[in-house]
Image (tube, helix red, strand yellow):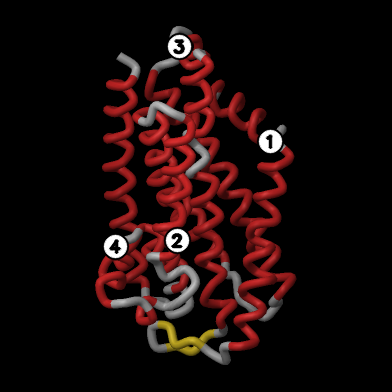
Amino acid sequence: MTIFLRDLLIRTKSLTMLLSMILMPLSYLIFLSLSLNNMLSKINFAGISITYLEYVFPGILIIGALQISMLCGSLLNIEKRSGMLETILSSPISRIAFIFGRLINSYILSFAELFLILFLVKIISPDISLSLGFILLGLLTIFLFSTIFSNISLILASTLKSEENYTASISITIVVVTFISNVFYPLSSLPMILQKIAMINPVSLAANSLRYTMTKNYQTILQNILILLIISLAFSIFNYKVFLKAQK
């Protein structure tokens, strides 16, 4: 809780961080979704016909969580270079509590952005149905998704020596997992080899979990959630081992 509150205070004091949480999803929804929503009549998803806005906004929820999660390791990177990390770890805070404090911060900010995006979606298109089941599934999906990419961010921060390498790795990761996914366009529009990669991309799995609520395909939703759970557990364990090794 100490690590969580400290990180939350640092992040929320940053005007740039707060503005990016608001402006990023707003820009996606307005400049991308609405323009293409007018150009594309309907998209066929899992046998039903939906608007482009209905297709893309679950992906925008996931991209918002991705960008917040990939910043999880930024404070760790700064603390390593400043020597603050040694001071923090010399206090009576366990290594696992340190990691989970960082993860909780990502969860809270990602949940906050989820509700912000849903609020914006209802303003832009009041006809879109946002059921309680969709919101609860969104919270669960983002929880697992944030666990995966927050741990990846912490692994990069633990292993990479320079700030430049860390920043470049974060940027490359965001670009690759975003555009080799079905966030902005159906998988069928990608080359076959990229389709196969995108099918196991956690971004695609998370976005589809939310989209399948429109088709009530609960078997596929459960399958995607289980895959995300397995991946999140794997990266959590790996991050803990990497963090322990890096601090020896």
* Residue 52, x across and y down, in percent: 56, 81
Residue at image mark 4: 200
Dot 1: few (<14), some (14–19), or many (≥20) neighbours within 10 Å? Answer: few
Residue 118 shown left or right of residue 187 in the figure: right
- Res 89 quadrant in image: top left
* Residue 20, x across and y down, in percent: 66, 49
Q: Residue at x 34, y 25 (%)?
A: 243
Q: Secondary structure at mark 4?
A: loop
* Residue 100, x across and y down, in percent: 44, 30
Q: Secondary structure at mark 2?
A: helix
Residue at image mark 2: 178
Residue at image mark 3: 86
User: Mark 1 or mark 2, which has the lower sequence index?
Assistant: 1
User: Mark 1 or mark 4, which has the lower sequence index?
Assistant: 1
Q: Residue at x 44, y 41 (%)?
A: 150
Q: Nearer the viewer, residue 139 or 198?
A: 198
Quadrant of the rendering where the N terminus is positioned: top right
Label 1–label 2 contact, CB within 8 A: no
Q: Amino acid at mark 3?
A: Glu
Choose mark 3 or mark 1, whichever is in front: 3
Q: Secondary structure at mark 3?
A: helix
Choose mark 4 or mark 2, whichever is in front: 2
Residue at image mark 1: 12
Q: Is residue 222 above or below residue 111?
A: below
